[in-house]
Image (cartoon, rainbow, N blue to C red):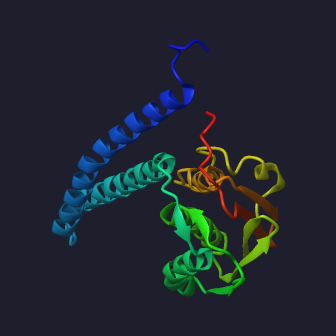
Amino acid sequence: MGPNAPNPADAWSEVVTLAAGFAHEIKNPLSTISLNLQLLEEDWQNPTTPREQRTLKRLQTLQRETTRLVGLLEDFLRYARTQDVQLQPCQLNQIVQEVLDFVGPQAARLRIQIRSAFDPALPVLRADPKLLKQALLNLAINAEEAMPEGGELLVRTALDGAFARIDVTDTGVGIPPQNLGRIFKVYFSTKEGGSGLGLPTARRIVELHGGTIEVESEPRRGTHFTLRLPIAPSQPEEDPS
């Protein structure tokens, strides 16, 4: 690469920034459309003629699709923002507990019991707490969606050599063997309406911290994710792409 050749990492960062800005600009009018569709639905809540019933049905279809598009844009923006890593001293156990507190009410509604075990000897990490919470939240949401009829979510932290380890285990439907090698690929999803960005975002965040994420799963028996984060990373790794 010559002295004046563009840096691929800088070019990728610029593309991501432009795409994120474009997505943000799209999200704003979509949110306005969604709000107005909601108001129109309220005006047509008691249809009395076939024409009014058809109109309400069409409004509801538009609202569902608009809501889905807003969700896709939000997922993309979360993925794009992972390039901005702000390292600071963090207590990993506290970060994990805050995520579990957040998902707890929804888990209770789904009849999912959360069990946790934290290693009190974990040292302070240098990490981005906001991004780590996002990665763990994505895993927790993925686990909840895998247990539509209830189950258990087990979360454990431990010291693992030079790494802090987080184990996230669910007793859900599991992942078919043919999909295990694809779940971290961007836009791959087996869920209807899924963005395919939740697990890739989690992996990207972990790797930007110099860590790793692994998965084991068995259909109808559950899935186990293992995250390892270095105790004291000096700098976040650059995205080679």
Q: Is residue 11 left or right of residue 37?
A: right
Pick the quarter of the image with the N terminus: top right
Q: Is residue 46 left or right of residue 132?
A: left
Pick the quarter of the image with the C terminus: top right
Which picture quadrant has residue 9?
top right
Q: Which residue lies at the image location 81% right of the left edge and 62% below the top edge?
A: 216
Q: Is residue 203 visible?
A: yes
Which picture quadrant has residue 135?
bottom right
Q: How many numbered marks appear?
A: 0
Q: Which residue lies at the image location 45% right of the left edge and 31% below the top edge?
A: 15
Horizontal and vertical percent position of residue 206: 64, 56
Q: Nearer the viewer, residue 3 or 95?
A: 3
Horizontal and vertical percent position of residue 51: 22, 57
Q: Nearer the viewer, residue 155 or 159?
A: 159
Q: Is 14 drawn above or below residue 96 in the view shown?
A: above
Q: Nearer the viewer, residue 49 or 137?
A: 137
Q: Nearer the viewer, residue 77 or 91?
A: 91
Horizontal and vertical percent position of residue 55: 24, 56
Q: Is residue 142 left or right of residue 99?
A: right
Q: Which residue lies at the image location 78% right of the left edge and 48% below the top edge?
A: 181
Horizontal and vertical percent position of residue 184: 68, 49
Q: Is 143 drawn above or below residue 210 in the view shown?
A: below
Q: Is 22 drawn above or below residue 35 in the view shown?
A: above
Q: Is residue 47 visible?
A: no
Q: Which residue lies at the image location 61% right of the left edge and 50% below the top edge?
A: 208
